[in-house]
Structure formats: C-alpha cells, structure tokens
Amino acid sequence: MITRMRFILLTALFLGFLQSAFALTDSLIIKGRINNLNGRLYRQAPFITFSRNNILQPQSELSKQADLQADGSFRVSLPMLFPQEEIYVDYAGKAFTTFLGSPGTVEITFNGDSIGKAKKLFYFAGANADANNQYPLYLAAENQRLNSSRTLGTEFFKSFWEKSPSDARFIAESRGEFRLGSVKAATQNTVASPVLYNWVRSVTDEEQLQILYEHAMGNQYQISKALLDSLKRLDRAPLTGQRVIWANRFGNYADQLVEGKKFDNPSRTNSLPVKLMAALIRDNSKNLSADDRQHLNQITANGLAEKGELDFMNKLFARNELVLNLLFNYERESRIYGDLFDSTATEFLKVRYLAKNLYKYTYPQQLLLNNHIKSRTGISQFKQSLDEIVQLEVKDSANIRKLVDFKNVRTAPAEALPGYYLTASNDRGTSWFNGIMDGLKGKTVYIVKWNIEDAKSREELDFIPALQARVPEDIVFLFVHFSTDDYTVSDAILRQYIVRHRLKGIHMSINDSQAMDLLFRLNPLDFATFSIVRPNGKFATKNAPAPSETEKTAKALIEVSQQ
C-alpha cells in the first residue's frame, strides 16, 4: 500500500537550481507557519524540506529546503511539470505528510507542540485545500479497511503472484475498488472532495497497473491490450509516486520486449533508414562543405541514387564517429519502441532511454543526447522531466573535471577532492587491499562492493549519502569496484559517477585477477554486497546490511565503532 512516497532525499539540495532551470514552467508557491515553534525545536530543525517526483527517476525525489523564520513562517517555490503533482513535506523526520500541489499557492500550518501527538497535524489552504485536508482521513480509513480484509489487504500479495492472468486482473481490480471505497468511508460526515477522489483513483488504478506488469514479467507472458491502452495516461495529471513506480515497471517490461525484438530480428534492429542516417550526419557533423551538405540534403529527400553515395556517407560518418554512434544507437532503439508500442508509450520510452543510461555517458554526451531526444518527442512533460535530471547530472561538472583530471593516483589513497580518495595498483589484490587496511587501523570501515553496470549496485549506492549523514565522520567508506568481462567502464565515467552520486570515501577499481586473489579475503565477491571491519582490522561481518537499510546499517556501524 502506498500511503506516501519516501524515496531517496537528495542531501545536496539544489537551492535556486530549479527556479533557474525551469523558468518557463509553472510554479507552486508553498508558504505557511509552524505555530508555537520553540527555540529548542528551531535549533534542531531550522528548515522544512519539500520534495516532488520525476517520472523518469523512481529512485530519487527533487527537493528544496524552506528556511524557517524566527516566527516559524516559511516560503518556497517548486516548479510544476504536471498540472497536479504529489508533494512531500518532511520536517526533520519529526513530522511529514503528502499533499497535492498545483500551479498557484498552498498555505500549510501546524503546531510545533503537537508533533507526535495530534491525529491531524497539518492544515491546508489555497490550491486543492479540500482534498489535502481530507487526505489524512482517507489514509486512516484505508489503513483500517485493508487491515480488516485478509484477501484484499493484509494477505493480498501472498497468493497474488501464483494466480492466472485473468484471476490476477480480477483481484487487482477488486483491491483497487476496495481502496477507493475508503474515500467514501472517510467523508461520511462531510462532502467528499472530487479532487481527492480523482487523486486516489489515480493512485489505486496505477497500483493495479504496476502489479499486473510485475505479474506479467514474473510469469513471462504478454500483457493484455487493456494494459497497453492504459499507457496513454502516462503524461496525464496527477503525477504521483505510484505513477513513477508503475512507469518504471512498464519500462522494465518494455526492456524485455526490446531485447527479444533484437534477438528475433537483428537485421531490422541493427539498421536505420538511409534518409534518417543522412539527416543525422548532416545535422551533427562538423566541417561539412557546402557540397557535402547539398549531397546529404538530396539523400535525405530522395534516398540513395547509386552505390557510391553509401561510401560517401560512410566517410562522413567516420569523421564524426563518436557523436554519430551515440545518435545512431539511440535511433535504433527508438525505432524498436515504435514497432512495439503506441504513441504515448513510445514517447515515454524515448526520454527514458537517456534517463536509464545516464551512468554510461560523460556529461557532454548527456547534454548532446538530451538535446537530440528533446527534438524527437512532442510531449512537454516528458521533455522537461528529462531536462530536469540531465541538468542535475551535469551540475557538478567543475568537480567532475577536477576528479577526472587528477593524475597523482598511487597505491596509497590520495585525496583528489575533499572527501574523495583514489587509489590504483598493479599489485596482487590481497597485498594492495591489506596495505590500505593497515593504513586504516583504528577506524571502522564499511566496504562496498559494486559495479557501475549492475542495477542493484547503483540502487544501493544512491543511499550512501543518507547513510554517511547518520554515522560519525571517522567511519571510513571503502568502495571496491569490480570490472566485468563484457563491460569495462572508462576511468572518466567511473569518476564522474562517483562525484555525481556523492560517494565520499576511498575508491579502488580492481581487475579480474586482483578480484580472484581477493576471493577469500572479501568473500562474497558479488556486486552490491557489504562488509564491516572493526578498528582492529578484523571483520565484524562479511555480510553487513545494505545502505538501503539505512537505520539498521547506521546502528551496526556505530556499535562496531564503539566496541
């Protein structure tokens, strides 16, 4: 059950970025006051965090802090890419809620001395006020109803995955209607807000869609036409956390179909129409002569007239191979999307292509692909969503350049940026690792084993900044990156990823032979596994909890450091 979405809070909050990057979008003005704000509470938490979703990035929220004034008042603005979006309020982990935002103004008030005591803490005025004030009543009613039903509530998922496709669809629809009925149950003594009903209907419908896509993937069957038709709602309001999860599940399902298509019909999926190739070469090549451009214009309009023209295009391609390969690969993938899905789904997958592959590209490549993809899609919400996350990716470009250009890498860790240490060695893995650990005697070490191509690794590493904020600064994070036979990431890409995701600590990048030498020392060598080393240099555990288990992991690290 999704009562509110708590994704990874961006700890480096981009104050001012959202306003400058999206001056053309509508804004939500949030203002209000914490009544009875005492000095102790103000010192503990002098700001409130407001977060919103991006449909292309389920693992993160986009967040801004509103500073509290001495009288408890606050004011902040957020860009709105959709006409309605879920917004999440977090006051220092002490009080939180979800509300529905629209372009305009929302006023929020709550009592500081009621935190943790009042059943209803937050009060809303302005845009969507009726819906936002009734929403906590709906959540309470829904929780009560779901707890009262084993079939549709507490034990729903125990048997759901083993059901036939038709039975799964029927019980998913029944659960959705049951959850939606909580609106009526919550508003028996008042008039239910139509906005609340539509909001909850969107959430419950898209939970159905999410779990039915998961059912199809888990049981390996093609989804129904009704599920395919539902994709037309991807660009409609409201944008909720549940929408983002569903869109991600659809994207995963689409990836499976795309790979199947590539396997079944490699000749089509590896080729592009000649006219499109000519246009891409013309529009993205440097130092073309007037004759070259005229010739490419003729091919774009009429196709190939003779075999020699293909040699002509190949020569031009070779001059700009790095740039054109990026664009050609994207267009090949985009062509498959069009073969498999209708317009809205195809438009979503086009922008998702870059969002899911950002880690593979340098930031100049990200900007190039972003501009090209935006020129190829017509849905503004999708274009703006892509632009938003790309701008976030490249905003650390100065530090990325410093880390990429750092040359003084030795066997002993060297600080390349404040908090970022690099080490490299051709020594055997065990002697290299032991040398680093000897230098860390007296400190608790959290070892992170990962690979940039591994989705689970990337998901877990997104929790690292939040985990580091919960533990003493003298706890060391040692990141051990494994290479793979089929994918060797460039050092520049790896360093870019480290800075962008704020992975402060010591970074080792080991090859296959070094990894095999470390087999017994670091076992398991699986990606996204973690270990804790005591200050005396001995392992406290080789199967430590993951960063995503933030509270549990922080507690384990603190306990080891105090032994």
Image: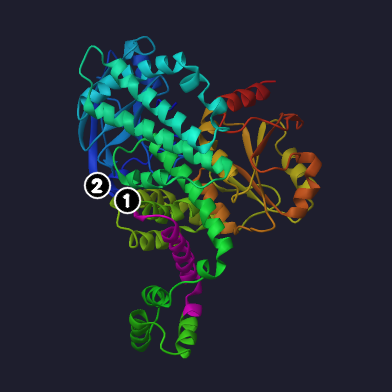
Question: For this rendering, which residue is in front, 71 or 117?
Answer: 117
Which structural element holds mark 1? Answer: helix
Quarter of image, res 273: bottom left
Q: Position of residue 545 (x, y in %)?
A: 64, 30
Q: Are marks 1 and 2 in contact (CB under 8 Å)?
A: yes
Q: Which label is found at residue 25?
A: 2
Which structural element holds mark 2? Answer: loop
Residue named by callout 1: 384
Examine the rendering and report whether any part of residue 12 can be seen.
no
How many C-alpha atoms fall within 10 Å of the one at disc 1: few (<14), some, or many (≥20)? Answer: many
Q: Is residue 474 left or right of residue 192?
A: right
How many C-alpha atoms fall within 10 Å of the one at disc 2: few (<14), some, or many (≥20)? Answer: some
Helix, strand or loop for the magenta stretch, by majority:
helix
What range is drawn magenta here? 317-343
* Point 42% across, 33% down: residue: 207
Q: Is residue 527 left or right of residue 288?
A: right
* Point 81% across, 41% down: residue: 520
Give amino acid for label 2.
Thr
* Point 55% across, 37% down: residue: 464
Q: Is residue 461 left or right of residue 57?
A: right
Q: Position of residue 131 (x, y in %)?
A: 25, 25
Q: Quadrant of the N terminus?
A: top left
Q: Position of residue 300 (x, y in %)?
A: 36, 79
Quarter of image, res 461: top right
Question: For this rendering, which residue is in front, 29 or 97?
Answer: 97
Q: Is residue 321 magenta?
A: yes
Question: For this rendering, which residue is in front, 209 or 463?
Answer: 209
Q: Quadrant of the C terminus?
A: top right
* Point 76% across, 51% down: residue: 514
Marks 1 and 2, how far apart at CA: 9 Å
